[in-house]
Image: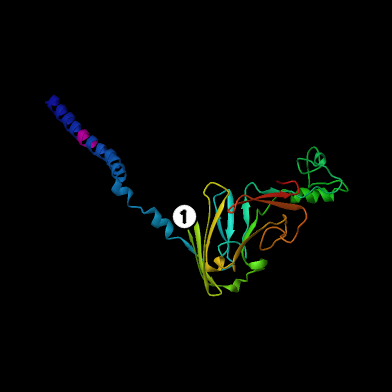
């Protein structure tokens, strides 16, 4: 009798474990089935990535407002004109500059640690006498430099004023990285498309306007001497000493510019 009861108990326990194992197997298989379903073309098409990104496109109709167009290494700051007519700088991770050393100093005398103190430093930097000039130099250098400024201008280098641009409609397409500016100058339509190459340090601009065909609107490129002064543009565009630009025309559609700034090439 006892054997029959024990056998019945073992049989009931085994049946219970069988149902438990079936349930656990179902729980384990269910996520795998879900992953398989998510990998189907129908599941993948549920997210419209273009629509998701494009719905956040930037619309900013401030003529002097700067939007960064870049690729992580190079950046072209564009204003409402599509160029840098009123604001914006061209910067890169590799574009650095140092001012010439103070008179009487050479690089071998400049401490690589940034201080003349030796041994354990138990307080603030203690610079020897007559080192104020090199101390200021070490604090200021190296510094980022503006690679160039690209503007829209009237003939003979006459500058445009912000109120010359009317009816501005500017959009930065986040999917393509292209900024498009539509506006009028003197009642004539101007369309400017601006973008930066995704991997090269290169900016591309397309300008469409009857003013260009008539010679009443031009694109001007100029360069600044590096400066630490805060202004609309980084650099001193009025200074002509300490830097030089050599232009070489290569056919009707290309010009190469070689820049020299102090000892930076």
Is 130 contained in the magenta span?
no
Task: Tell me the magenta residue range.
Answer: 16-20
Is 19 contained in the magenta span?
yes
Q: Nearer the viewer, residue 207 or 202?
A: 207
In this picture, residue 172 sits left or right of residue 160: left
Q: Nearer the viewer, residue 149 or 32?
A: 149
Crowding near the residue tagged with mark 1, few <14, some 14–19, many ≥20 C-alpha atoms within 10 Å: few
In this picture, residue 202 sits left or right of residue 224: left
Q: Position of residue 209 (x, y in %)?
A: 52, 66
Q: Nearer the viewer, residue 162 or 230?
A: 162
At horizontal 53% and vertical 46% (from top left) the residue drawn is 199
At horizontal 18% and vertical 29% (from top left) the residue drawn is 10
Local SS, label 1: loop
Q: Position of residue 93 (x, y in %)?
A: 62, 48
Vertical relation: 130 (above or below) 217: above
Q: Position of residue 223 (x, y in %)?
A: 68, 56
Q: Is residue 138 visible?
A: yes
**Res. 85 image quadrant:** bottom right
Q: Which residue is mark 1?
A: 176
Q: Position of residue 126 (x, y in %)?
A: 82, 46
- Majority secondary structure in the magenta region: helix
């Amino acid at each position: 009798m006892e054997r029959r009861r024990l056998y019945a108990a073992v049989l009931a326990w085994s049946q219970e474990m069988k149902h438990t194992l079936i349930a656990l197997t179902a729980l384990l298989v269910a996520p795998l089935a879900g992953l398989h379903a998510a990998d189907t073309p129908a599941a993948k098409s549920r997210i419209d990535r273009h629509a998701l990104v494009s719905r956040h496109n930037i619309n900013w109709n401030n003529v002097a407002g700067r939007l960064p167009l870049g690729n992580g290494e190079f950046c072209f700051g564009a204003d409402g004109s599509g160029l840098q007519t009123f604001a914006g700088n061209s910067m890169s991770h590799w574009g650095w500059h140092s001012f010439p050393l103070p008179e009487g100093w050479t690089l071998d005398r400049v401490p690589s640690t940034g201080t003349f103190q030796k041994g354990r430093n138990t307080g603030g930097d203690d610079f020897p006498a007559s080192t104020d000039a090199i101390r200021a130099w070490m604090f200021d250098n190296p510094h980022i430099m503006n690679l160039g400024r690209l503007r829209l201008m009237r003939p003979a280098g006459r500058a445009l004023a912000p109120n010359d641009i009317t009816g501005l409609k500017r959009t930065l397409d986040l999917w393509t990285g292209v900024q498009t500016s539509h506006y009028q100058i003197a009642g004539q339509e101007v369309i400017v498309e601006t973008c930066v190459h995704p991997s090269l340090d290169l900016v591309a601009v397309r300008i469409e306007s009857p003013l260009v065909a008539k010679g009443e609107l031009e694109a001007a490129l100029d360069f600044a001497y590096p400066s630490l002064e805060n202004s609309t543009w980084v650099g001193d565009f009025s200074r002509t000493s300490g830097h030089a630009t050599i232009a070489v025309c290569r056919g009707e559609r290309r010009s190469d510019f070689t820049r020299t700034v102090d000892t930076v090439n």
